[in-house]
Image: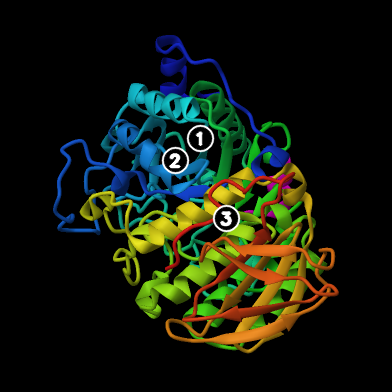
Amino acid sequence: MLAVGYVLLALSALAVGGTHAATADQWRREVIYQILTDRFANPSQPTEACADLSTYCGGTWAAGVPYLDYIRKLGATAVWISPIPDNTDGGYHGYWQQNMSRLNANFGDANGLTQFVEACHKLEIKVMLDVVINHVGNQDSSDHNDFHQFYPFNSVDHYHSYCIIQDFTNLQQVQLCRLSGLPDLNQSNTFVDGFLRDWIKSTLQTFGFDGLRYDTVMEVPAAYWASYTSDLGVFTIGEVDDGDVATVAPFQGPLDATLNYPMYWALRHAFQEKQSMWGISTTWKDCKASFQDTKLLGLFVDNHDNPRFLNINSDSVALANALAWILFAEGIPIIYYGTEQGFSGGNDPANREDLWRSGYQTSNAIFTLLTVLTTYRNTLPDSFFQAEQLERYVMDDLYVFVRGQVIVATTNGGNGHSTSASVPDLPFANGTRLIDIVAGKDAITVNNGTADIVIDDGACVELCLAPSPVRPRPLLCYGPSV
């Protein structure tokens, strides 16, 4: 078997204590902050925006270390970083790998990556590595069978025969043909399979990543994922970029979880486009009926492949409601870097802004709201993360659910919108007082299992038990509204 060069070098040169393996159960509590390594922190500390978002902007692993406190202040407990191998020209995002035995020198060296991971662990931040095993980067030759530039996959038999995905409903085509023209690896080839297995195990052992996010999961057969990840000992979550529950759900099992793209689209339709909140209800019920464990699925409002929320709907109050939904619903919330700064980029690469243009501000309304909500979420007992999410009230402009002892009421009406409802079947004794985490006030008294919830000016409502002589005030249960 061909040696995994940079990993073997790192093992001999660095005093790394092996993998910090974290199981699926250990990820249930986490709040993940997704970064593009090239866009998070630049060692030259520029204050102006990157001039060309279609290529490298200068972010590195080592430069990110001083800004880990920023992630912690936001309330995130894990960080998802870009793929680390050497890429073809222009692969600032990391998804166009060229040489899997080398690190992407634009991001730094093995020492810089080790420094970043170890600094995260000192702050009790888990690190999730993005991994690509479906394809390599763009070819520099017009000959579709010329793979000389790639290492170690430089032979025609390392790839599926040339064809381009035209029909994403045709699973055979999706798994055997090229996505956007990128050469498609043949995992059934003994050499390819063996190298991919050795590479990921050595990478985990060398750098101590706590979890893995896999790219383009649907493009690789589910049976291969089950075999490939079975003995890694870390949490695995995959991207199945499809809004259909029936398409995405079968990949949970082979992997610990998937990104919940069906809920992403339901939330987008409801909160960004102001379609009926009944769409959330329908999709959520489909998810519960089809996925093995919805509590492990990745919930998100923004990501690097779609226009940002505020690009479609500039109302930050609507965004706040969507963020509140994912932070307390069943699943692992993922905050895409820049959402907290009100970034509003459109299609790739405009949605991949450099973070330093924001000055890493921590006093703006969205950052402040996220801090309040994540801080409270992080204080909740383990029982909350095993609790079921129970839908309690739905209208076109209102969605209310209860989970454990938290009630979440969200509206898609946006800034200035008001609505109300008498929400039944709540798990609280008669006379229980609830306080609004967001507005910071005593809000509601439960009567016969029902609470009258009023939303003013479009603000989301997060309700928790009010303090009592035997139950002290929850940490930061009071906070500013957006």
Judge whether residue 220 is colored magenta: yes
- Residue 41 pos. (x, y %): 28, 42
Check disc 2 and report the residue beneath it. 72
Residue indicated by mark 3: 333
Whole-Å distance between the Cαs marked 1 and 2? 8 Å
* Dot label at residue 125: 1
Residue 467 x/y as whole percent? 67, 52
Residue placed most toward the observer, 367 or 31: 367
- Give the mark, 3 or 2, whose residue is nearer the N terminus: 2
* Residue type, mark 3 in image: Pro
Residue 118 appears at what percent x and percent y?
Answer: 45, 24
On screen, 136 above or below 178?
above
Q: Which quadrant would residue 480 be assigned to in this image? A: bottom left
Q: Residue furthest front?
A: 469
Residue 172 appears left or right of 334: right
Q: CB atoms at circles 1 and 2 under 8 Å apart? A: yes
The location of residue 38, given as percent across then percent down, is 30, 45
Looking at the image, tell me whether mark 1 or mark 2 is earlier in sequence order. 2
Measured Cα–Cα span from mark 1 to mark 3: 15 Å
Looking at the rendering, the stretch of residues picked out in magenta corresponds to 218-227
